[in-house]
Image: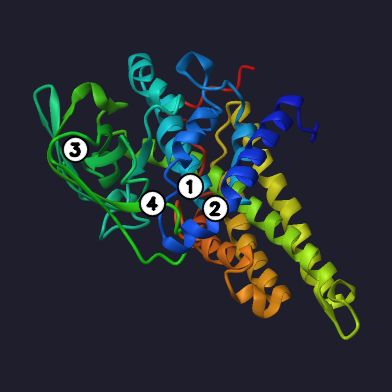
Amino acid sequence: MDFSLSADHRMAQKMVRDFAQKEVAPVIKEFDRKQEPIPWVYRRMGELGLLGICLPEKYGGQGMDYISLGLACEELEAVDTHLRVAMSVHTGLCALTLLQWGSEEQKQRLLVPLARGEKIGCGAFTEPGMGSDVAAMQTSAKREGDSYLLNGEKMWISLAANADFALVTARSDSKAAKPAEALSSFLVDLSSPGVTRGALHGKLGVRAGVTGWLKFDNVRVPLENRIGAEGEGFKITMSGFDHGRYTVASGATGIIRACRDASVAYAQNREAFGKPIAEYQLIQQKIAQMAQDYEIARLLYLRVGWMKNEGLRPTLETSYAKKFASEASFHAASEAIQIHGAYGYSNEYDVERHLRNARGAMIYEGSSEIQTLIQAGYALGQRQNKALRCELPPYQG
């Protein structure tokens, strides 16, 4: 068992860290305060190859492995969550799902521009009246000859205002025996007639990231843009969540690290009662917990990356990683504010923003409660990794 990173891993890690720390960190407070996206950030991520970091070279990607994706997400979210969100929805939910389920023709036509960052993708699953209950979605896709008519609304969609494509799950069979068997998946061109969209404002966190809604009014989707077979939409969506949750887990690990580092620096320089507060045991206890949680979270997500590299399905392991890291990141940010005192309660220090950003990870892409049910289901023998029609291809590097 080898826990060391390869030279390629370290190279990718450094490249992403340099981008996030040197190009984004100096301006992130301004855009977080204005609650506006950084105009150039997604284009720049595409230029650097980040949006296709783990996609095969033959489809326009960088050809790196799934551990590299996790390392990238950790470095991005150590600066700000909105950077990792782009990786979650563009690379995880959209591109990796297309890699797993798309036909060769679809990969050449649709995946290549996504892998190169020439087009931006998102995942459109959540609806106004539906959160964790995926099978209950009401957006409909009615077959008409060689196309489908899409009608419905999606809510809380990251990159909704920026994306060129959306991976959409919709109800294509109103007579299916089970709700989950009624769903199909489509890659929808968001420039199509009948698509309207807008942005949501007033979020607690991820304020530099674009979150919005999509509405489909008789949007015609060609048959060749259906992903997988009709009725496979539920399986496709859940496999997409495996990819997305991996990026959430690795990204949240970055917040833990950032809070640990910020707390160490502050505690070593802030004095109280005649000595640095780093010398007080209660401060040491908080920092030790952050250090411990970082190591645990990192090992959990690296195991998931290794499983993906081997072509294994890590649904349970991803759930462990996502729940632990998201909850630990919120706790780390809260304790970091406590260490910083009144300064931590202001936006003068990054830990205030990390606390707001960390809270969302316990909700989106499967809440902590859903992760608990998944884990209990496996422990009780009520769930198992049933073979899907196809798995992500193992890393071939």
Query: Marks 4/2: CA distance?
Result: 16 Å
Mark 4 or 3, nearer chain start: 3
Task: Residue at 50%, 40% (x, y): give it.
Answer: 87
Q: Nearer the viewer, mark 4 or mark 1?
A: 4
Residue lying at 41% horizontally and 60% vertically, measured from the top left: 35
Answer few, some or many: residues within 10 Å of disc 3's Cα (few below 14, many 20 plus, some between 14 and 19). Answer: many
Which is more N-terminal, label 1 or label 4? 1
387 is higher (above) or lower (below) than 161: above
Quadrant into which the N terminus falls? top right
Residue that badge 4 annotates: 210
Residue 396 in the image, given as x and y percentages of width and height: 61, 17
Q: Mark 4 is on which residue type? A: Val
Give, as a three-letter code, the residue at label 2. Answer: Val
Tag shown at residue 172: 3
Q: Nearer the viewer, mark 4 or mark 2?
A: 2
Horizontal and vertical percent position of residue 383: 50, 46
Residue denoted by label 1: 85
Sequence-first tag of 3 and 2: 2
**Residue 177 horizontal side relative to residue 263, left or right:** left
